[in-house]
Image (cartoon, coloured by chain):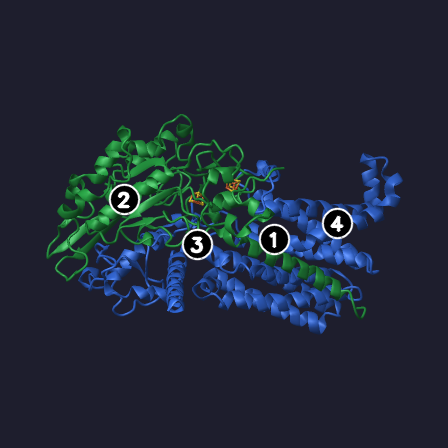
Chain colours: A green, B blue
Amino acid sequence: MTTVSSASPSLEGADSRNRLFGPLPDVSADAGYEEDHPSRVGFFTDTSVCIGCKACEVACKEWNTLPMDDSNGVLGQMGMSGMSYDNTGQLGANSWRHVSFIEQSRSVDLPMPTIGMPGADRHDHGHDHGANAISPQADSVLSAQTSVLNAEALSEFDPQTSVTGGDGGTQIRWLMSSDVCKHCTHAGCLDVCPTGALFRTEFGTVVVQGDICNGCGYCVSACPYGVIDVRKDDGRAFKCTMCYDRLTDGLQPACATACPTQSIQFGDLDELQARADARLATLKSQGVETARLYGRDESDGVGGVGAFFLLLDEPEVYGLPPDPIVTTRDLPAMWKAAATGAAMIVGVVASSFLGRRR
Amino acid sequence: MTTPSSTSPDDAHLNGRSVDAGSTGNEPAGEAPLAAAAGGWHRAGGADLTQPKRRKRRKGGGGWGSGNREAAMVPDAEFSSYYGRQIVKTPTWKNPEVPLYLFLGGAAGTSSVLGALAEFTDRPTLARNAEYVAGAAALGSVVLLIDDLGRPERFLHMLRVFKPTSPLSVGSYILSPFSAFTSAAAGFRLLELAPLLKLGTKVLPFLPALARFFPGARKASAIAAAAFGGPMATYTAVLLSNTAAPSWHEVHTELPFVFAGSAMAAGGGITMALTPVAEAGPSRKTALTGVALELFMVNKVEHGHGLLSEPYHEGKAGTLMRAAKKATITGAAFTALLGRTRVGAVIGGTLLAAGSVMTRMGVFEAGIASTKDPKYIVIPQKERMAARKAGEAVAEDEARSVVR
Ligand code: SF4
Ligand code: SF4
């Protein structure tokens, strides 16, 4: 009998408050890997350059041989969701990448003192930001990403922030975002899995072992993002593995490889975080006031995530929870209440035997 | 797959399209004044805000553009979502199997404690009935739990690790010994019956030789079972609360007491109904205390949590919770007033058990409902963020005044 929880040490002593939530500098070491484990990897999904091509979805389905389903997750069904170009609908057992589509408009003739036309001031600032965080000895993938991040061309043709159209001064933009399992620092799914099927890999990611899972479904209820689900005809839980099989062979995940715009960037998490900070600064300087990072903050409710995002609107607009908290953060309080309740039952029954007979 | 029912056209409508359909009667949100923070963007062709179901849209709430974003801080506010779709997944747990499991666990847990104590206070009939109830309900629990798995043949995988962070893991280590000891106690009792002993002797010829050990073994098993009885009744509350289902998680310090009360009402009620009134005093008292605890705690769950209490009132969950309350109160009245008559005890006990079943079903349904509407995720989480921000601002102010 072993303990294989991401947080079980917390219930055995030492700094109990901080092991169930909050920042965790080395998730793999916390899960019991030796010091020489690989560094934590992740995705930085920069939705500001996503063109909604769904190449990531297709690459994921192909590589992981995921069965087809409709936008409600019904296996073997095909159908239109009625939600814009999104017929995938949601993440689930059979969709490990999901590109969401939101068409938005706004009137441009209204006074907007602080906003301005996106990119209107890019000639003043565009060159100063973006690439500075990236190391000079970058490989070819990295330099391609660098050029995308820094390119003047990008803000010129940015499909999401500089399209003017419609009539009467109405401006249209598309928000597109490729959602994925967040590979949380404190993963609810992993904490609650009773069989140990879900585990933390040496790369710091969270993966289900198909030969262990017994389909209890607890992970499904515990994920604050609604990512993992049970596959109906199979009975077991499935979710993104960050292509664990490819990682162990030194390859990038299929989705990141397929993404034509570097919207999905794969790499060491700390490097991605630096890159994302730089990208956010660039966008802000270009006047994209609504840009923000989601999941980047390591002091948030799940201790930061391994797959984080740059969004152009509030998280809930993309179907993401605005302030997710890992459910096990409150577990000590729950066990305390349950133990008190259990003691109460014994106490009440025992005292009911006292006193007058009958 | 999220919701088995969401495949019906009706639900697809609710989940996906009603948002757009509902906003067609409103002025184009594009004409509303713009809020700077959102950059003035809103979903094209209609508002991007999701309206609370069955509530009238407020005047002037034309979207984020209305500059009315603080509106999200009041319970029936509008909020944004992705086509009105749910954010967290709906639990895949089977209904009514899992609520029944919660009920049986509670009834068995209380009965096991009653049985063990009855053994030593000269109440042979109560001891016998309580042990039979505990054994049967515990075995039923095991069957229901295994049946709920996607891969039932892998039930034993539950026991390959022990994880204090997983209530289901902890629960497996409670249920396994509990069901073993309760069925052992009930089994020894069955063997004390002459015909059954004869039957058993056909398979195991040495049984009669061991017969004199049966009472002792039975009592030992009953005590061992009782040690797991309390946890068996309340761990299931942690099972539900330790999820992302907002209306379960929100009440996580109260639900164990709801379940404790409900378990005492059920266990007390059932053993009271089966046992002659002369011996059933402890069952009656246990049941009545349980009812009081349950009603008190359910009231907290139903009224203490603003928007997240709502699922406990509405729809199927609300109907079940109200019916549960009626059955429980009527059952308690019968128990208190007529519990010392056989008829009164049977009616009271049956009503209490029914109330307990419906409470579990209502709680279960409420949590399920809270996963299906994104408002239960978005609005409380935005409130939480706003409160945190306000708190930080206050702290900063204080820090500044201290410096000064
Ligand atoms: S996003 Fe959900 S499924 Fe993915 S690691 Fe976090 S809790 Fe688990
Ligand atoms: S369904 Fe499988 S992966 Fe999910 S919690 Fe249960 S055993 Fe673990």
Residue that protrudes farthest toward the left in the picture: A168
Above or below residue B125? Residue A193 is: above
Left or right relative to B340: residue A270: left
Asked which secondary structure carries label 2, the reply is helix
Q: Residue at x 67, y 55 (%)?
A: B230
| Ligand 1's quadrant | top left
Q: What whole-number distance in Å separates the C-alpha atoms at marks 2 and 1?
A: 47 Å
Nearer the observer, B54 or B36: B36
Q: Please name the residue that numbered disc 2 is placed on.
A: A278
Residue B283 x/y as whole percent: 73, 63
Q: Residue at x 47, y 35 (%)?
A: A201
Which kind of residue does numbered mark 3 sit on? Thr
Q: Please name the residue that numbered disc 4 is placed on.
A: B224
Which is nearer the N-term, disc 4 or disc 3? Answer: 4
Chain identity of mark 2: A
User: Do the numbered discs 2 and 3 sit on residues whose CB atoms are within 8 Å?
Assistant: no
Same-chain check, marks 3 and 1: yes
Neighbours of disc 2 within 10 Å: few (<14), some (14-19), many (20+)? many
Q: Please name the residue that numbered disc 3 is placed on.
A: B371
Residue B191 x/y as whole percent: 81, 45
